[in-house]
Image (cartoon, grey):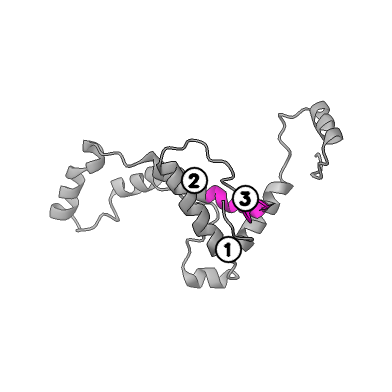
Amino acid sequence: MTDSKMPDFQAGYEKGITELLSALAGANLIYEAAGMYGSLLAASKESFVLDNDMIGAILRATRGIEVTQDTLAFDVVRDVCIKGPGHFLGHDQTLNKMQSDYFYPATADRRTPQEWHDDGAKDLLDIARQKTKQILNAQVPAHISEETDAAIRAKFPIHLPRP
């Protein structure tokens, strides 16, 4: 939760700190972990998209770091440092670990400043707005029958169209 009234730096650090510390302390269910602002007085659809990335990174952090003979990879260290190029960037183990151990956020921009600028210099909130529109314009899940959908729409003010 954050006291910030909008998706800004304050919101990011308050949410990040409280959620990470809660998760590292062992919490397995954290309420109001996404989308909420102003001490739970407001919610933002775009922030559900942004917070999903943050929560993914937090879940990766709580998974911990496995320490085994395989992960220590003394043979790789020997090959790279003594027999090899002196860096790990070209080693297969580096790529494999990056694919299995690193969390790649869906919305964060990992390009160079020049690439970002040449592509319109969109900030993270702009990217989240675009992603939110894509999600809301996507097909409705097929696991909800026409009858169930009609019953839900009769009871609640649903504004999303049924395909």
Secondary structure of the residue carrying numbered label 2: helix
Establish if 110 lies above or below 106.
below
Asked if the residues shown at circle 2 and circle 1 are in contact, with their CB atoms under 8 angstroms apart, the answer is no
Above/below status of 8 relative to 31 = below
Element carrying mark 1: loop
State the image coordinates of residue 99 (x, y, percent, origin top left): 40, 45
Q: Amino acid at mark 3?
A: Gly
Disc 1 residue type? Answer: Asp
The magenta segment is 35-53
Q: Could you tell me which residue is drawn at 62 percent across and 57 percent down?
A: 128
Is 56 within the magenta?
A: no
Q: Which residue is mark 2?
A: 56
* Residue at the spot 51% in from the left edge and 46% down from the top edge: 55
Are the residues tagged 2 and 3 within 8 Å (C-beta)? no
Residue identifier under label 3: 35
In the image, what residue type sits under mark 2? Gly
| Relative image position of residue 104 (x, y in whole percent) | 46, 50
Label 1, on which residue?
8
Q: Is residue 143 left or right of residue 86?
A: right
Circle 3 crowding by C-alpha within 10 Å: few under 14, some 14–19, many from 20:
many
The mark closer to the camera, 2 or 1, is 1
Q: Quadrant of the C terminus?
A: top right
x and y percent of residue 86 in the render?
A: 19, 58
Q: Is residue 91 above or below residue 29?
A: below
